[in-house]
Image: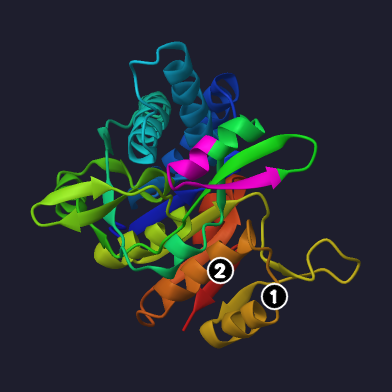
């Protein structure tokens, strides 16, 4: 029996951007996860939340405008909400798909907090755009609160927040306990809720964490065998989108590091996946990372496709 642990990181394409899109998209994700479970892998799932957390933030901000007695929800609360509702859709669809295959295995979603360093340089150089477009006056008020905003041509202004690196996953022992109980676990959604440790208290940070980097951190903490990063393409490619595009079957850590230095991968898409793959594969030869599409997830794990990153 295969008892290998896999951390599966679902990208934006696995969730869609709206409630109806997500409802349909998670069916495909559930099918890919069920394939892995049927192949006897222990599965932990992470997922993106970019469009979802932005939608929640915009909705909560609008609500505070309609009801002035209610303050704007902080990013940590919006992140927690996104983990809950995305997890709800995922765990129900995965449960349904497994039962349709005659497999009974509980699925649990865990609200997950991730420690970040208050002195992380990212807090001085915010890079993640979040929320609705604002007027100049609204942008001015955000600046007065100490928040960062950027101007978007012909659209107004948007808030921009930091993306610090993950340092520690607080619910790691709970995830391990659920795995030991033979459950499928959905955790660290959206990279986890970024928190700052202040004595015995955890305080939510006004930030988001790159979910692929948290996925690598989680895979390391669980001593997983495989980090499976699912995206919209079957393989990583050099010179992507050009006539000289070259798909890669494998990459060593040294090769991946060289390609990163050459800026072969786009910042908002493939780069964080390759960086996460390098981070996890660097642990040792018994660990490997695979980047492939959601439709070829099992084939990627079986070595039939995808890009494999190893020492």
Left or right of 263, for residue 147 = left
Query: Residue at left 65%, top 30%?
Result: 135
Residue 263 bears which disc, if any? 1
Instruction: Give the image location of residue 245, x and y in percent.
Output: 82, 68
Instruction: Give the image location of residue 38, x and y in percent.
Output: 39, 43
Residue 143 part of the magenta-drawn span: yes
Residue 276 bears which disc, if any? none
Residue 274 bears which disc, if any? 2
Q: Which quadrant would the N terminus be assigned to in this image?
A: bottom left
Instruction: Give the magenta-colored segment's residue range.
Output: 141-151
Query: Residue at left 67%, top 56%?
Result: 234
Q: How many marks?
A: 2
Query: Residue at left 35%, top 79%?
Result: 283
Q: Nearer the viewer, mark 1 or mark 2?
A: 1
Foreground of the two, 25 or 30? 25
User: Label 2's element?
Assistant: helix
Q: Evaluate whether residue 75 shows in this view.
A: yes
């Amino acid at each position: 029996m295969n008892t290998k642990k896999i951390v599966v990181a679902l990208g934006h394409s696995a969730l869609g951007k709206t409630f109806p899109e997500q409802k349909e998209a998670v069916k495909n994700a559930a099918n890919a996860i069920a394939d892995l479970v049927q192949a006897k892998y222990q599965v932990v799932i992470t997922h993106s939340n970019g469009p979802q957390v932005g939608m929640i933030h915009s909705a909560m901000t609008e609500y505070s405008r309609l009801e002035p007695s209610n303050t704007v929800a902080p990013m940590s609360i919006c992140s927690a909400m996104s983990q809950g509702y995305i997890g709800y859709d995922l765990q129900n669809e995965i449960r349904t798909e497994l039962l349709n295959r005659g497999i009974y295995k509980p699925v649990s979603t865990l609200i997950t907090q991730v420690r970040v360093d208050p002195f992380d340089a990212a807090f001085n150089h915010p890079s993640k755009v979040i929320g609705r477009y604002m007027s100049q006056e609204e942008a001015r008020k955000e600046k007065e609160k100490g928040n960062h905003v950027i101007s978007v041509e012909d659209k107004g202004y948007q808030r921009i927040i930091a993306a610090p690196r993950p340092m520690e996953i607080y619910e790691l022992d709970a995830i391990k306990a659920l795995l030991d109980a033979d459950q499928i676990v959905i955790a660290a959604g959206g990279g986890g809720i970024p928190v700052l440790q202040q004595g015995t208290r955890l305080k939510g940070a006004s930030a988001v964490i790159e979910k692929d980097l948290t996925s690598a951190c989680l895979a390391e903490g669980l001593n997983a065998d495989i980090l499976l990063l699912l995206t919209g393409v079957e393989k990583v490619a050099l010179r992507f989108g050009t006539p000289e595009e070259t798909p890669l079957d494998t990459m060593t850590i040294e090769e991946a590091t060289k390609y990163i230095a050459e800026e072969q991968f786009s910042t908002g898409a493939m780069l964080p996946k390759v960086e996460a793959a390098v981070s996890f594969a660097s642990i040792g030869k018994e660990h490997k990372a695979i980047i492939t599409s959601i439709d070829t997830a099992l084939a990627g794990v079986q070595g039939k496709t995808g890009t494999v990153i190893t020492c």
